[in-house]
Amino acid sequence: MSGAMWGVWGYPKQGQVGAVGRALPVLTLWCALLVPPATLATDGTTLGRITDTVTHVVSRGDTLAKIMASHGVGASEVQSWWRAARPKRDLSKLAIGHEIELSFSAERRLISLGYSIDDEERLIVERDAIEGAFRTRVEEQNVFVTPTGARGRISNSFFGAAQAAGIPEAVISEMVDILSVRLNFDAQVRPGDRFRVL
């Protein structure tokens, strides 16, 4: 919060004096005016004061227009934001499960839009509060790595047992490619064999 101090002083009319013969202020008023600071974009432009931010997880059938309309953004506004984002990302195609973040001012004017492109990158579109110009960029997201393990016993095939243990298909395929250099999965892997993945 930033503060601005101001004061108003009033003085008595001519001839009005205090008990000791000197003029006395009849009114003394000091106020601290606290104003929420405007949000600044990375390039220093003023975005306005964000008072509300909503996050929407994209589901089947969602479109940018549908999502933004559900939060009070008009069709012409949607087109403006879509055009502003297009040089970096075409928002006519939204991935299911990805997030769209909308930030509004107190007047419910859309100030910024964020879209998670993937686990590593995020699209940011911002509108300058004074000039009305859009700024679009892609920034890196914070990535958190959590170690995960799985184990299982082979009954028919390694692939089937790994799937049953909850290992993603892409990871199984990569494991097979790496281990095939030293292990013949057709001849050396038998029912009853155990495995562990970390």
Image: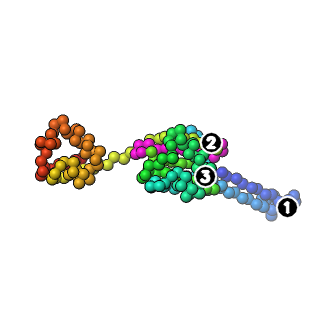
- Circle 3 sits in a helix, a strand or a loop, which is it? helix
Magenta stretch bounds: 118-131
Mark 3 and mark 1 in contact (Cβ < 8 Å)?
no
C-alpha distance separating marks 2 and 3? 18 Å
C-alpha distance separating marks 2 and 1? 58 Å
- Circle 2 sits in a helix, a strand or a loop, which is it? loop
* Viewer-nearest of discs 2 and 1: 2
- Alpha-carbon neighbours of circle 1 within 10 Å: few (<14), some, or many (≥20)? few
Residue 65's x, y, as percent? Answer: 55, 52
Residue 177's x, y, as percent? Answer: 23, 39
The residue lying furthest to the top in this view is: 181
Q: Amino acid at mark 1?
A: Gln
**Residue underneath mark 1:** 16
Quarter where residue 128 is shown: top right
Q: Please indicate, yes or no, whether residue 65 appears anywhere in the rendered image.
A: yes
* Viewer-nearest of discs 1 and 3: 3
Residue appearing at x 44%, y 55% in the figure: 60
Q: Amino acid at mark 2?
A: Ala
User: If you read the primary sequence from the N terminus, does the residue marked by circle 2 or circle 3 appear first?
Assistant: 3
Residue appearing at x 68%, y 57% in the figure: 31
User: If you read the primary sequence from the N terminus, does the residue marked by circle 2 or circle 1 appear first?
Assistant: 1
Q: Amino acid at mark 3?
A: Ala
Residue toward you, 26 or 146: 146
C-alpha distance separating marks 1 and 3? 65 Å
Residue appearing at x 78%, y 61% in the figure: 26
**Residue underneath mark 3:** 75
Q: Is residue 45 left or right of residue 175?
A: right
The residue lying furthest to the right in this view is: 15
| Magenta residue check for 127 | yes
Q: Please indicate, yes or no, whether residue 57 appears anywhere in the rendered image.
A: no
Q: Residue 133 got which mark?
A: 2
Residue appearing at x 26%, y 50% in the figure: 167
